[in-house]
Image (tube, rainbow, N blue to C red):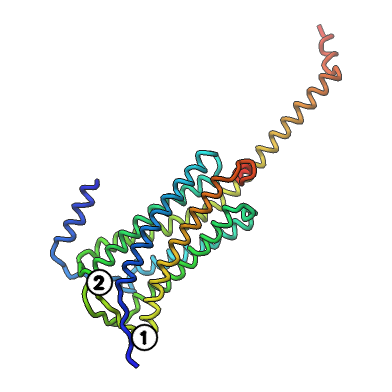
Amino acid sequence: MLFAVSAFFALLLISPPPALALGLQWPTEGSYVRQIAHLLFAASMLFFIREIYYTGLQRFGGFRFLVWSWGILALWNLNAFVGNWSEWTLSNPVIVGHGFSRQLLMSNANTWLFYLTKIDHFLLLPPAFYLFYRGLKVLAREPRPEGPGAEGS
Amino acid sequence: MTNPYLYLAPLWLLGYAASLLVILLTLMALRESRILVARDPENALWLFLNRLALVFAIFGFNHIISHGLQDLITYWDYPHLDIARRIFSGFDTIIYVTAATIIFFFHRIQRLYRRMEADHHHLEETSHEILALNREMEALGWNAPCRRWP
């Protein structure tokens, strides 16, 4: 299996470039599906926060961490939605240099939006998953009779 | 006033650092969720969190691959990798939808599970009440007339 995956990537790397499109074009079906998936993911996170409060699970420390985690993940999804929209609507971005020295000309508000949403994208995911891990850890360490598992919730 | 140029490399480096951290954290979360399931295998909430942790761990690995391919295309001029990037981006989308589906369905399962738990407790209480009543009747000699039948 590993050999097959490695061979697949090796073939892609050494194969001659067939001049496919660079990056996603906005009006493709995949772009719309991805954007809808981000909105759906964000909605499910907000829905789960509501469920935690509705069932009274927020009184457990672990679930309070999970609420923050879902909140940040919902924010990340909205950020990714805006970032994707910004990236796919960049009109003729000016990029100079090669490899690590590539630079982007910040020519308009959309270019700034693209750059800033890329930074936010990476600043939001690690805290969200840290809080998810922390929440589960607190729940796993809670004494059994006092935890939500004891109530079958 | 001229427009500034900003390096794209920080985005690339920040992205990889964050992606590696996400993989580590999701694997740690998966381990904690397994501890919860091992403690109470029949608890629907722990099973749900375990499945969600598994989906997030898959997301962590897939995300770094799709972003790596994106960077190979953008920074190192490998446009022919675009087909692979599209495949992994598609998996990314499927993972978002899967996570959302698990959460939305969990709402129903959670309510059903709570009702089953309540019914179970109610049955247990009724059973205890019947047992206590039976003992009281035995103590009062309620079954004595039955013994007089031939």
* Residue extending farthest bottom: B1
Q: Is residue A56 left or right of residue A22?
A: right
Identify which residue, A6 or A145, lies in the foreground: A145
Q: Is residue A108 above or below residue B71?
A: below
Q: Which mark, residue A100?
A: 2
Q: Is residue B72 above or below residue A85?
A: above
Q: Is residue A22 left or right of residue A17?
A: right
Residues behind callouts 1 and 2 on a single chain: yes
Residue B20 figure quarter: bottom left
Identify which residue, A5 or A30, lies in the foreground: A5
Of mark 1 and mark 2, the one earlier in the sequence is 2
Q: x and y percent of residue A71 in the render?
A: 53, 63
Identify which residue, A70 or A26, lies in the foreground: A70
**Residue denoted by label 1:** A108
What secondary structure is found at the residue carrying circle 2? helix
Amino acid type, label 2: Phe
Q: Is residue B97 above or below residue A35?
A: above
Amino acid type, label 1: Asn
Residue at 57% x, 54% y: name it: A63
